Image (cartoon, helix red, strand yellow):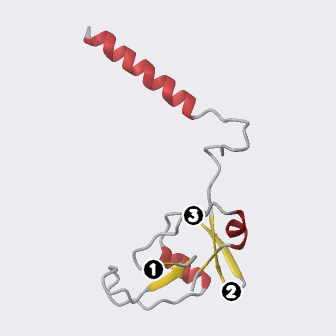
Amino acid sequence: MSRIFTILCLFVVALATASAFTVSNSNSVRAPTELQMTVLARGAKKMNFKPGSPLKNACAKLGVKPKYSCKKGDCGSCTVSVGGSRMKACVGKVPPEPRLKSLQEKGLEIK
């Protein structure tokens, strides 16, 4: 009985993974291979960054130089504003792409 159950479970997992990699022709669903990039801006300079990458590297590439004291996020001296929300650059990650079309084109402003 347990062999039949194991075989059934493996079959269900195989079907689930096969359907996860199919590409839909619908415009509302993005293909799983398409990379999502977040546009960050500082003045006239705009760059694409991968969501989840370190915010301190993104700040450095845009020319923002936050002060670092503890490098653990305890002191808050490295706090920068990303799209209106305050984040600690030393431990923060690049946020995901915003849903608003205007923010996707203009980019999230770093101050």
- Where disc 2 sits, the SS reads loop
Q: Mark 3 and mark 2: span between their CA atoms?
A: 20 Å
In the rendered structure, which disc, 3 or 2, sits on the residue that comes first in sequence? 2
Residue 43's mark? 2
Whether the residues at callouts 3 and 1 have beta carbons within 8 Å, the answer is no
Quadrant holding the N terminus: top left
Residue at the (70%, 82%) spot, across then down: 45
Where 68 falls versus 105 (above or below)? Answer: below
Mark 3, residue position: 50
Give the mark nearest the N terminus, 1 or 2: 2
Residue shown at the point (44%, 18%) measured from the top left: 11
Q: Residue 4, how many percent across, how many down?
A: 33, 10
How much space separates mark 3 and mark 1, taking CA atoms? 15 Å
> Dot 3 surroundings within 10 Å: few (below 14), some, or many (20 or more)?
some
Label 3 SS: loop
Residue 75 placement, left or right of 33: left
Residue 106 position within the rendered picture, expressed as x and y whole percent measured from the top left = 71, 73
**Residue, disc 1:** 89
Q: Secondary structure at mark 1?
A: loop
Residue extending farthest top: 1
The C terminus lies in which quarter of the figure? bottom right
Report the side of 96 relative to 44 (left or right). Answer: left
Foreground residue among 106 and 93: 106
Q: Quadrant for residue 31, please give it.
A: top right
- Spatial CA span between label 1 and label 2: 18 Å
